Each structure stands twice: as structure tokens, then as C-alpha cells.
Image: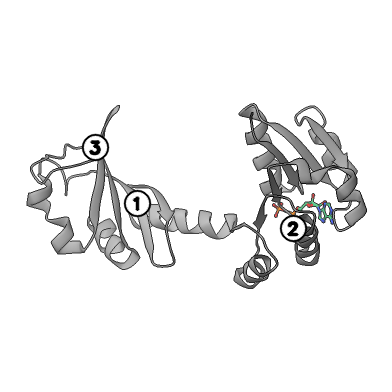
Amino acid sequence: MKKQFAVIGLGRFGGSVARALCEMGYEVLVVDKNEQRIQDFSNIATHAVVADTTDEEALNALGIRNFDIVVVAIGEDIQSSILTTLILKELDVQTVVVKARNALHGKVLYKIGADKVVYPERDMGIRVVHSLISPNILDIIELADDYSIVEIHAGEFFSGKTLKDLDIRAKFGCNVMAIKSGDRINIAPLASDRINEGDILVVIGHNDDLQRLEEKA
Ligand code: ADP
């Protein structure tokens, strides 16, 4: 059976999460205290309900504990975000994903039981900065505070060279995990594998080392 989602707060982030889930064919309940926002989603979401989610009774009445994943996308009003998260965990919702405005907000959310905290503005900012440092950076996934996986578009620096020639592990302390060439992906690259211009390298490493590599790329 497909997972059931609820999205609380239909601002820019929550609205975009709800739209994407609906487009992927999931059943989505959307909740907002603002009637106009709920009107805007009445034809998009499976169920759209006006409610203040800091009211435990109101949340309970929605049968919120039956949803597999609840996304709390209340950004501005930190108090409402925290109260809503607390109530959801007290009602035994399995997975609660919450958008945080800043690190302190995120810390509080984890302390009260949030299963995952996301920082969409911060993460997008980081992505944009990487693409500005090197237009060849296609994507970045943060693994831990100091470690990431990046997708690098192979330009002149890499072109025509083997992994042995490039010696990325010794020179930059990073590991090439995979090489994508068009539709093909090589997930166990060998030292003798040659990189062609236009290939995409998937590289894992410490952020400082990745930055040195990005500046070359
Ligand atoms: P973004 O920064 O992603 O645009 P906002 O903080 O502007 O997010 O939007 C949050 C949404 O959450 C708004 O539509 C607001 O009406 C809704 N919201 C805020 N507090 C509550 C609450 N207590 N119960 C339900 N919805 C809420």
C-alpha cells in the first residue's frame, strides 16, 4: 500500500511539497489555518482542511495518527511549529518531518522528537554557492557536518584521463564512487577507467577536499 502523507502549513515550502506529492500520485491531506490557502489546494490535494494544528483536539479529529509521514512546514511562527511537532509525536505519528528556520529551532525540534529536520533555505543557499564556485557542480548531498557527495561535470581537467592519471584520492583525499556516461553508470570504477568530456563524476569526501577539487573542475 502507498504511503499516506499529511502536509501542515501551505507556505512556499509546504505548498511545493504537497504539489510534488500529489503529482507523484500520493494521497495527501493538507492542513492550514488560513482558509484561502486551503481553497487554493482544494482541487489539488486529496483532502484539504482548515485547522489550527496547535490545537490537539483538532489534530486528533483529523485522524492524523493514521498518516505514515507528516510534514510540518510552518516556517515563520516558530512557536506553532514546535507545538504542532510536540502534539504530533504525543499522538504517536510515526514519522514527523519538520522545516526549521535556523539551527536552534532545529535543535529544539529534535529534542521534542522530530524524526527529521530540514533546512530548505540553507540547503538551497549551499547548492547555489557550490554552483557559483564551479558551474560544473551539478548537485550536492550533505552526509554529515563536514562530508558530502557531489556530482561534478567532467570538463577539461578530467577529460581523456584515467582515474590513475588524475590520482584524486592521493591529491585531493576524495573518492570517485561512480562515473555516469550518458545512460550508463559505472558504480565500481577502476583505476584504468578513462573519463570523457561530458561524463559526470560522483565524488565523496570532506568538504574542504571537495572544495579544492571543485575549484579545479
Ligand atoms: P514558507 O516560508 O515556506 O512560505 P510560511 O511560514 O510563510 O512558510 O507559511 C506557513 C504556513 O503555515 C502559512 O500558510 C500559515 O497559515 C500556516 N500556519 C502557521 N501556523 C499554523 C497553525 N498553527 N496551524 C495551521 N497552519 C499554520
Residue underneath mark 3? 199
Q: Amino acid at mark 1?
A: Val
Q: CA distance from mark 1 to mark 3?
A: 14 Å
Which mark is drawn over residue 21? Answer: none
- Residue 180's image quarter? top left
Which structural element holds mark 2?
Answer: helix
Badge 1 or badge 3: first in the primary sequence: 1
Q: Amino acid at mark 3?
A: Asp
Q: Are marks 1 and 3 in contact (CB under 8 Å)?
A: no
Comparing 121 with 142, the one in front is 142
Q: CA distance from mark 1 to mark 2?
A: 34 Å
Judged left or right of residue 139, residue 13 is right
Callout 3: 10 Å neighbours few (<14), some, many (20+)? some
Residue underneath mark 2? 89
Q: Position of residue 155 (x, y in %)?
A: 22, 44
- Residue 85's image quarter? bottom right
Q: Amino acid at mark 2?
A: Lys
Judged left or right of residue 24, residue 29 is right
Q: Nearer the viewer, mark 3 or mark 2?
A: 2
